[in-house]
Image: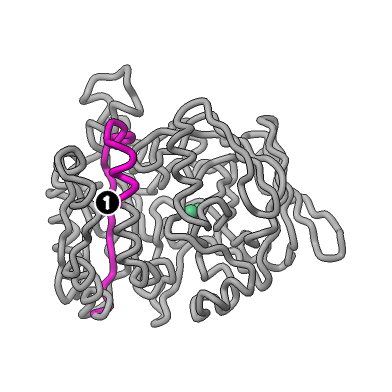
Amino acid sequence: MVSENMYEKLAELVVKKGVNVQKDQPVVIQAFVHDAAFVRMLAVRAYEAGARYVSVEWRDTELSKMAYRYETPEVLSEVPQWKYDKTKYQHDGGACYISIHSEKPGAMADVDGEKLRIANMAYYTKMADLLDYTTNNEGQWCVIGLPSVEWAKVVFPALSDEEAFEKLGDAIFAVTRVTEDNDPIAEWDRHDREMIEHADKLNAYRFEKLHFTSGLGTDLTVELVKGHIWVGGGCVTPKGVYFDPNMPTEECFCMPAKTGTNGVVYASMPLNYNGKLIDGFWLRFENGRVVDFDAKKGKDALAQLLSFDEGSSYLGEVALVPYDSPISQSGILFFNTLYDENAACHLALGRPYPENIEGGVRMSKEELAAHGANDSMQHEDFMFGTADMAIDGIRADGSVVPVFRDGNYVF
Ligand code: ZN
Ligand code: ZN
């Protein structure tokens, strides 16, 4: 059972280690209205850490659904200039961002998919040049989750509201490494060091390609971009501020070359895309592009994801996660990417992280493309790691190095 003390410890962890708030730095919190009590805990810690101001952007699923139901596509496609200006003002002030997720997975399932697509497209188009701020780690950002009854009932449908909420809370705090009597900040320092070690080893091998196979039928070769960098643990801003963008995180990730993926990949977990569940799906790649796909459930949503823009049918991320990770070991399917992506090896369709190329965060879009990077307005992770996953690294001289056997690192 999660105590008040553990929420306080989580708030401190997020402020000090998650975003690592600096003196005089603006702090922006994106949260659901039902998490107001925790947001107040965060805000007071942020002020104590020297925040210049704390600004909260409230969300509410019911109100969002209402907007999609009653507003016309024309209205939904209008993104007012003040929204852009507000975000620009926060970026110019060097803000850091804390984003709290506790929404019900699939909450948007009964919303008109076309309206969702139109609103998303309009938002990303309007905000296009502001997206780099977090993608390039220009300012610190951190995504965490909190339990809610609506979410818990999706994860544990057979339990009562209270039991489900308690069990999801226990799981979230455990995988976020916050317990009643530990020092979560020291725990995260140690965990970060371990992940950096894995990334260092992967970087030392300078693999040209990775070959993935699994009993589900995955047989996929992913070429990495030139000058690639594997990243694990936290990130560093240009000002040298270390932060942990995802809590939890268990992945070492890298950038695929846009046109270098071939073969077939079978997803090992459902994907929650724009509030719609896609399950039992596979993708076939030729020279980087998805040329064929199918899904047992949510094929329309998958088709929408793939045709969102040109880059959304190419990969932007490849990530290694040991099957032994605490999230995988919990055996819980959270129906939320922050957790589920850290349970298994995953790929992302769409936008890559420029930090995965040497000097990438200072490159123009053209320079990134010249290094083989994909580009897209969206970034959608999906899991394909399994208990029997095997990964071989292939070096430029053709030599093959085992990286994963039976779902875990060999080295
Ligand atoms: Zn990832
Ligand atoms: Zn990702």
Observer-nearest residue: 183 or 272? Answer: 272
Q: Is residue 183 left or right of residue 312?
A: left
Residue interval drawn in magenta? 93-119
Examine the rendering and report whether any part of residue 355 can be seen: yes
350 vs 87: above or below: above
Quadrant assignment, res 21: bottom left
Observer-nearest residue: 333 or 37? Answer: 333
202 vs 388: above or below: below
* Residue 290 is a magenta residue: no
At label 1, the amino acid type is Ile
The quarter of the picture where the N terminus appears is top left
Identity of the residue drawn at 68% across and 71% down: 226
Identity of the residue drawn at 52% across and 57% down: 310
* Label 1 sits on residue: 100
Identity of the residue drawn at 29% across and 36% down: 112
- Secondary structure category for the residue under label 1: strand
Observer-nearest residue: 28 or 401? Answer: 28
Examine the rendering and report whether any part of residue 410 can be seen: no
269 vs 102: above or below: above
- Assess disc 1: are there few (<14), some (14-19) or many (≥20) residues with their C-alpha within 10 Å of its C-alpha: some
Residue 73, x across and y down, in percent: 23, 47
* Residue 103 is a magenta residue: yes
Residue 360, x across and y down, in percent: 54, 75
Identity of the residue drawn at 51% across and 63% down: 375
Q: Is residue 123 left or right of residue 187?
A: left
